[in-house]
């Protein structure tokens, strides 16, 4: 009788102990904490860089609206491709020529176009449009596969702004 009683007492004593319970709870919570951390970091990084790109495109549009001649529709150059390098510098670099975007954010292209709206105006104002294309990658995207999700692919987005040409 004493031999059979020994395993039952040991088992009861083992089940009453809670050594390591905190470690087990932490192991359950760790994947969710990592997901929250990744969402916060990736979302913050994406919004900061998107806002930086929007500001750069607005600056480039203002530059073009004041740099182009007011009679742009009469002069009518075929395209504005010669401004590509200048516009990429305005969108992607600071005043001191420091790159604004961190690694993983690529400024693919910056283009300027213009349209000449039809109508009877005092001057025929052209409208210039600057378009920038960015590619964002997500360094923490593999964390989302911890809970059965898929890791995210690169995100390509286009930012556009337009303004009336005021001329030089």
Image: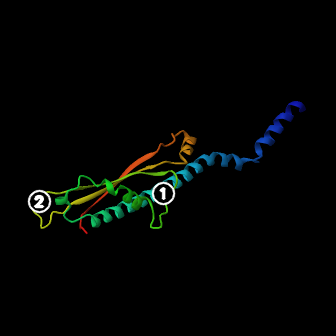
Total labels drawn: 2
Residue 161 at x, y percent in the picture = 31, 58
The image quadrant of residue 71 is bottom left
For mark 2, what is the residue? Answer: 119
Q: Is residue 147 above or below residue 58?
A: above
Going by the image, does 47 lie left or right of 34? left
> Label 1 belongs to which residue?
101
Q: In terms of depth relative to the viewer, which is nearer, 111 or 133? A: 111
Q: Position of residue 139 (x, y in %)?
A: 54, 48
Residue 48 vertical placement versus 9 (above, below): below
Q: Image point 42% across, 57% down: which residue?
A: 50
Q: State the residue in front, 145 or 108.
A: 108
Q: Nearer the viewer, residue 87 or 57?
A: 87
50 and 39: which is toward the camera: 50
Give the structural element (helix, strand or loop) at label 2.
loop
Which corner quadrant holds the N terminus? top right
Mark 1 residue crowding within 10 angstroms, few (<14) / some (14–19) / many (20+) = some
Residue 16 at x, y = what percent? Answer: 77, 45
Residue at image location 48% in from the left, 57% down from the top: 101
Q: Is residue 105 left or right of residue 82?
A: right
């Amino acid at each position: 009788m004493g031999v059979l009683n020994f395993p039952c007492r040991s088992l009861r004593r083992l089940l009453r102990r809670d050594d390591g319970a905190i470690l087990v709870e932490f192991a359950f919570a760790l994947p969710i904490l990592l997901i929250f951390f990744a969402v916060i970091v990736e979302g913050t990084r994406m919004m900061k860089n998107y806002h930086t790109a929007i500001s750069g495109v607005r600056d480039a549009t203002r530059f073009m609206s004041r740099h182009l001649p007011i009679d742009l529709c009469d002069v009518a150059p075929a395209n504005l491709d010669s401004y590509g390098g200048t516009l990429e510098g305005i969108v992607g670099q600071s005043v001191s020529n420091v790159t604004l975007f961190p690694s993983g954010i690529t400024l693919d292209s910056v283009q300027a176009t213009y349209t000449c709206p039809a109508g009877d105006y005092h001057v025929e104002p052209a409208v210039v449009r600057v378009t920038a294309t960015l590619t964002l990658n997500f360094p923490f995207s593999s964390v989302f596969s911890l809970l059965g999700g898929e890791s995210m692919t690169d995100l390509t987005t286009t930012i556009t702004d337009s303004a009336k040409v005021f001329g030089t």
